[in-house]
Amino acid sequence: MIPHRTPALLAAALFLSQTGAIPMAEAADPAPSFTFTSIDGGTYDTAQWRGKPVLVVNTASMCGYTPQYTDLQALSDHYGDKAVVLAVPSDDFNQELSSDAEVKEFCELNYSLTLPMTTIAHVAKGSVDPFYAWVKDSQGFVPGWNFNKVLIGPDGNFVKGWGSNAKPMGAVKDAMDALLAGKS
């Protein structure tokens, strides 16, 4: 049985919270969503991927790290519809082919890529893509080279960023596994 004084205590707490004497929990800002233009036509909207981890990787076809495409595709295949691996080709470091069509053909022929890929975008220089501008403004993370990785959690918020040396099937996979297991 609830004591008869409980309504009075609740009323007092409400009054104090409205006067600022007791801080009320503020609602968290919703995570932003971003739209990318697909190299295949159409768009990708990160809001459609809520509920799953999203790994965003700035890529380049003529880079020494380009063989990481093999592991990025393996990661995408491993998770299937539980997570997303998104490749964002960029020529910010002067190592990308000159057109979206060339990038798409190169990736299909050399790496059999089926993971989502965007059109060529700026990630660190010039008119930076809004996603990368958000990562820079909110986290201070700016790709310093090709194949930097940004992990977005199922809630749409930044989780972690890695440089080019981070192996997709190593620490990156471990972080994605932790998110899927609810341990992060």
Image (cartoon, rainbow, N blue to C red):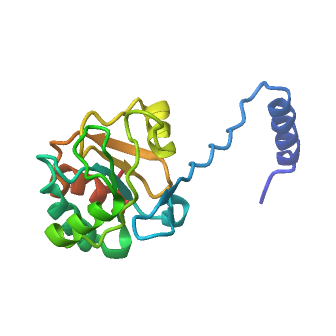
Residue 99 picture quarter: bottom left
**In the figure, 19 relative to 63: above or below?**
above
Q: Residue at x 19, y 60 (%)?
A: 69
Q: Residue at x 48, y 47 (%)?
A: 157
Question: In the visual, does 146 lie left or right of 46?
Answer: left
User: Is any atom of residue 86 visible in this view?
Assistant: no
The image position of residue 66, as x and y in percent, is: 16, 53
Out of 174 and 112, give the one closest to the viewer. Answer: 112
The image position of residue 67, as x and y in percent, is: 12, 56
The image position of residue 3, as x and y in percent, is: 81, 51
**In the figure, 39 relative to 30: above or below?**
below
Q: Residue at x 28, y 60 (%)?
A: 103
**In the figure, 156 relative to 148: above or below?**
below
Out of 51 and 122, give the one closest to the viewer. Answer: 122
**In the figure, 153 relative to 29: above or below?**
below
Out of 68 and 182, give the one closest to the viewer. Answer: 68
Tell me the quarter of the image containing the N terminus: bottom right
The image position of residue 94, as x and y in percent, is: 25, 40
Q: Residue at x 83, y 30 (%)?
A: 16
